[in-house]
């Protein structure tokens, strides 16, 4: 999450027109990654992995359809 925040802040300072894309893609990649890690680490027993992955997928879909 620190890398995501650093990327968003960097984009906010130097590439303002791309802030929305970077924010949505960053959130999507982080949540999908955390959701899949949670799936494999808990062997599917943790209740949060589907929701985390779904949030990431929806953020990536929003970035794709916002173009």
Image (cartoon, rainbow, N blue to C red):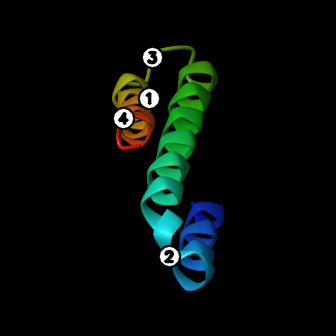
CA gap, disc 3 to disc 4?
A: 32 Å
- Please state which of residues 63 and 42 is positioned toward the viewer in this rendering: 63
Identify the image quadrant of the N terminus: bottom right
CA gap, disc 3 to disc 2?
A: 41 Å
Q: Is residue 24 above or below residue 38?
A: below
CA gap, disc 2 to disc 1?
A: 27 Å
Counting residues from the N terminus, which is met first, the one under dot 2 or under dot 4?
2
Give me the residue at 57% from left, 26% from top: 36
Circle 4 residue: 65
Element assignment for label 1: helix
Give me the residue at 33% from left, 29% from top: 51
Q: Classify 10 Å Cα crowding around label 4: few (below 14), some (14-19), many (20 and above).
A: few
Counting residues from the N terminus, which is met first, the one under dot 3 or under dot 1?
3
Circles 3 and 1, Cβ within 8 Å, touching? The answer is no
Counting residues from the N terminus, which is met first, the one under dot 3 or under dot 2?
2
CA gap, disc 3 to disc 1?
A: 14 Å
Residue 46 rendering spot, x and y as whole percentages: 43, 24
- Please state which of residues 63 and 51 is positioned toward the viewer in this rendering: 63
Element assignment for label 4: helix
Circle 2 residue: 16
Quadrant hosting residue 66: top left
Circles 3 and 2, Cβ within 8 Å, touching? The answer is no
Residue 41 relative to residue 63: left or right: right
Residue 58 rendering spot, x and y as whole percentages: 35, 33
Circle 3 residue: 45
């Amino acid at each position: 999450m620190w890398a995501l925040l650093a990327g968003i802040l960097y984009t906010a300072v130097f590439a303002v027109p791309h802030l929305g894309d970077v924010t949505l893609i960053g959130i999507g990649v982080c949540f999908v990654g955390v959701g899949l890690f949670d799936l494999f680490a808990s062997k599917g027993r943790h209740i949060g992995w589907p929701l985390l992955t779904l949030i990431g997928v929806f953020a990536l879909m929003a970035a794709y359809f916002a173009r």
